[in-house]
Image (cartoon, rainbow, N blue to C red):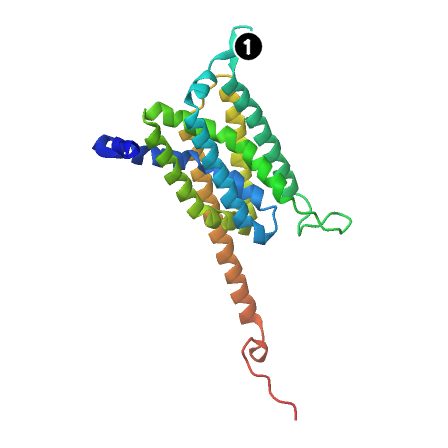
Amino acid sequence: MEFLQVFTTPEAWIALATLAMLEIVLGIDNIIFISVLVDRLPPHQRQTGRMIGLGLAMGTRILLLLSLSWMMGLVDPIFSIGAMGFSGRDLILFFGGAFLLYKASSEIKELMGVPHEEKEDGSPVKKASFAMIMAQIAVIDIVFSLDSVITAVGMVKEVEIMIIAIVIAVGVMMFAAKAIGDFVTEYPSIKMLALCFLVIVGAVLICESFEIHIPKGYIYGAMAFSLVVELFNIRMRKNHHMAICDVRDEALPHDAKPGHDQPANA
């Protein structure tokens, strides 16, 4: 059992716990993107789409880890423009960020359009096909997996620890995927916030392809603050709605209030 011999030291367990936590944090943008995309599927297919999407994310990360020599080659410049060299990783980040910008912007435009899933002529909007959604998730999983795998390689040397940390992180994301997805679907303002977050992530990926590094702590911090503010707004709107309903009930005549028995006609 050479695979388990790595975990005979306390340092290995500490590294596993730390890396698993980092992988969960780095997977936030991945799970948000999946939640937004599967929302275009019929309700009975959404949970299946989430599980397959996260399964693809885990498979992509593990395959990249098992091809570390190829991964290391991605950082070597392929061509140069002036004094700036571009590697395979840079190209993947650039095109992945551009795709994320396009997809998130398209979703924002659609979310701001005609509600109730109807076009202007009254015809229903067609749901996206399951295969198309899975293809889009698979493409963006590659981009998000690069960041995840590069972080893992930089933290630990043992591939076994990296793989188990990724499996644990994706398992946690699978457990939370339905709750996050349902929450995003129920509150359109949260979905808009998530899409704006994906726009920022896409822009950051493009910046990183040009070696302009933006600390992700700032991005996650701003996102967490925005989420807390929006949760307060949701709570405030709910309280105002309940207060208006109470005022309307009080304004009704006593015999017209819900639950009051009407007198029988003679």
**x, y percent for residue 225:** 43, 39
Q: Is residue 156 above or below residue 121?
A: above
Q: Which residue appears at 55% of the width and 49% of the height?
A: 46
Q: Which residue appears at 41% of the width and 24% of the height?
A: 150
Q: Which residue appears at 62% of the width and 31% of the height?
A: 102
- Farthest residue, direction bottom: 266
**x, y percent for residue 235:** 47, 53
Image quarter hosting the N terminus: top left
Depth order, front residue of 154/219: 154
Q: Which residue appears at 42% of the width and 40% of the height?
A: 170
Quadrant in the rendering for residue 217: top left
Count of numbered circles in the view: 1
- Farthest residue, direction top: 82
Image quarter hosting the C terminus: bottom right
Q: Secondary structure at mark 1?
A: strand
> Mark 1: few, some, or many residues within 10 Å (few <14, many ≥20)?
few
**x, y percent for residue 85:** 51, 10
- Residue 24 located left or right of residue 44: left
- Farthest residue, direction right: 121
Depth order, front residue of 206/223: 206
Depth order, front residue of 142/34: 142
Q: Which residue is mark 1?
A: 79
- Farthest residue, direction left: 9
**x, y percent for residue 243:** 50, 62
The amino acid at mark 1 is Phe
Q: Is residue 2 above or below residue 189?
A: above
Q: Is residue 159 above or below residue 245?
A: above
